Amino acid sequence: MGVWRRRSLASFSIGFSVFGALATLLVAVSAPGKAAELPALQGELRSGNILLADLSDSGRPTAATHEIPEGWSYVNLSWQAEVDAPAAAPGSALTSYLWKAGLQFGYLTPSGHLHELRGDTDGKWTHADLMEQPVNSEPAAPGSALTSYFWGGYKQIAYLTADGHVHEICRNPGQWWSHADLLQQAGVAGAPSAVAGSALSACVWRAYKQIVYLTADGHVQELSCDTTAKWTHSDLMQRPGIDAAPAIPGSPLATYLSGDDKQIDYLTADGHVHELRCDVNEKWTHVDVSQSAGAEAAAAVSGSSLAAAAWAGCRQIAYLTTDGHIQELGCDAAGKWTHADLMEQPGCDAAAAAPGSPLLAYVYGGCKQFAYISPDGHVHELSCGLCETWKHRDLMQEAGMNSDFAAKGSRLAFCVWGSLKQIAYLSESGQVHALGFRP
């Protein structure tokens, strides 16, 4: 997976944008602890014979290219756009996606507008208010969830409006934007509205794009679109053979694929993790995962996040308990569920998660990995490879950061772009920051 190293240069704060082996080094002059404050300088900023940045009349740095070494770095993406991107609403959802070889992050502003920061392979970042594109879209409800997916050559982002409808904004390869209220599509008319504060999750499965949300009765609802653009709706709790407890109000949703199957996870009032699973024959089954894993599986704390991923033929689900520990429920190829408190694994001396911390689950470099935020605003990662012990990293310490930590209530978004993995979060100023690792 590469060597983890702290990367710093005197009092410079280093960020990057990368595709493959090339990187762009973005450097700003700062005093320790005040990375966001720039002096009004002009001209060039150099280290030896390396041009680090051109300083404009306002003292803002502009990008200069230089290949950076392996390890962690960080960057304020809101500053890198040609026009300063507006601040995100406090606690805004974050989503990430790849499209046309570019990396994109989406977030919401207080007006309910969906904004996008896009990085190209040449290191250039741009910003767009997607609701000012010619799509006739409605603003998102305060606190709306976001989910995104790539399907049929389109990049697509879904969100909720005040009436509980699921809306979708998408852009096709010809660069045209479009918008749709999915609950008003033919075949979906009559589908119930999402409950206020519902989670959203999505996946592409067997050429179908699918979005799930929650209704007031705690049922998981699924919207599905086939290759002919025909939408259908299903209440998954009412599928044949499903006798599932309803989700608790405010439950997260986690969707992931494992082999030919799709899985949707949620939490119930007793803090148990439940999973709805659909196989290749479109047969749905349900399991109380916490119960299947045995009595040692502690209940999830109220407000816990969920994250899930498939790894090495196994399924992994993570959640939080009252002590801020990350708990893992794992299912092997034989269908046996087990439980582990990851903070108590040998060699894993990790800080506890903050109350309400988001969770990410992903596979990178052959390892299963989980990310979270601690009370001091630091982003942490737990990692485990095959036949290896768990390892912990404070990613902000690895990157040499001393400011611009994650705000209370910040979400996290993850993406692999080329060989680089990136984790985005929001700072107290509402700006989008990214931590990235180059192997």
Image (cartoon, helix red, strand yellow):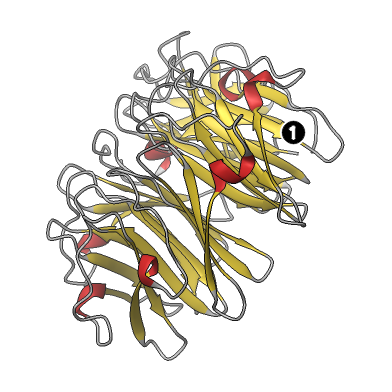
Based on the displayed image, in which of its 4 quarters is residue 304 positioned? Answer: top left
Q: Nearer the viewer, residue 280 or 387?
A: 280
Instruction: Decide: is 59 above or below 77.
Output: above
Please name the amino acid that badge 1 sits on. Glu
Rate crowding at label 1 as few (under 14), some (14 to 19) or many (20 or more) other CA atoms within 10 Å.
some
Residue 209 in sight from this viewpoint? yes
Q: Residue at x 63, y 21 (%)?
A: 343
Query: Is 379 left or right of 383, judged from the image as shown?
Result: left
Can you see residue 66? no
The N terminus lies in which quarter of the figure?
Answer: top right
Image x and y of residue 89, in percent: 23, 38
Dividing the picture into quadrants, the one containing residue 201 is: bottom left
In the rendered view, does 153 fall on the left or right side of 135? right
In the image, is 113 to the left or to the right of 118?
Answer: left
Q: Residue furthest top?
A: 32
From the top left corner, tell me how far across and down residue 384 is, in percent: 75, 34
Q: Is residue 46 above or below residue 304?
A: above
In terms of secondary structure, where does tag 1 sit?
loop
Q: Viewer-proximal residue, 5 or 361?
A: 361
- Quarter of the image containing the C terminus? top right
User: Disc 1 designates what residue?
Assistant: 70
> Where residue 51 sits in the image (x, y, percent)?
61, 31
Residue 231: where, in percent of width, then height? 34, 83
Nearest the viewer among 317 and 127 is 317
**Residue 106 or residue 129, whichever sits in front:** 106
Q: Quadrant of residue 65?
A: top right
Residue found 41% across the figure and 73% down from its top: 239
